[in-house]
Amino acid sequence: MSEKAAHHHRQAAHHHTQAAHHHTEAANHHESGDHERAAHHAHTAHAHSAHASDHAEHAAKAHAEEHAEVHA
């Protein structure tokens, strides 16, 4: 695996972890009745999930480029 692909996989994993944390915080605030804080954490979780998806897409592109170079 190229270093470029590995970098994007690591970044995707990091942002998935951050998203999970904020989803948990959103659930906790929702359960305690603080819907404003819950909404804030849900929004932040969504942003991290989107960022993770972007990195996963970049990793897939790096894999495709690497595959094309090997078979060129």
Image (spheres, rainbow, N blue to C red):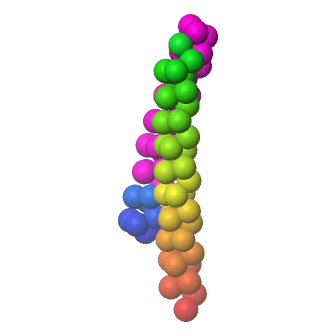
The residue depicted at 40 percent of the width and 58 percent of the height is 7
Q: Which sits in the foreground, 60 or 42?
A: 42
Q: Is residue 22 magenta?
A: yes
In the displayed image of the protein, which residue is found farthest to the front?
36
Look at the picture and state if 56 lies above or below 39.
Answer: below
Q: Position of residue 8 (x, y in %)?
A: 44, 58
Q: Which sits in the foreground, 41 or 60?
A: 41
Look at the picture and state if 55 lies above or below 61.
Answer: above
Q: Tell me the chief SS of the magenta region.
A: helix
Q: Quadrant of residue 28?
A: top right
Q: Position of residue 35 (x, y in %)?
A: 57, 18
Q: Position of residue 49 (x, y in %)?
A: 55, 44
Q: Which sits in the foreground, 53 or 46?
A: 46
Q: Magenta segment range?
A: 9-33
Count the numbered circles shown.
0
The residue depicted at 50 percent of the width and 28 percent of the height is 41
Q: Quadrant of residue 38?
A: top right
Q: Position of residue 11 (x, y in %)?
A: 42, 51
The reply to whether residue 44 is visible in this rendering is: yes
In the rendered image, which quarter contains the C terminus? bottom right
The residue depicted at 38 percent of the width and 65 percent of the height is 3
Q: Is residue 21 magenta?
A: yes
The reply to whether residue 63 is visible in this rendering is: no
In the displayed image of the protein, which residue is found farthest to the bottom?
72
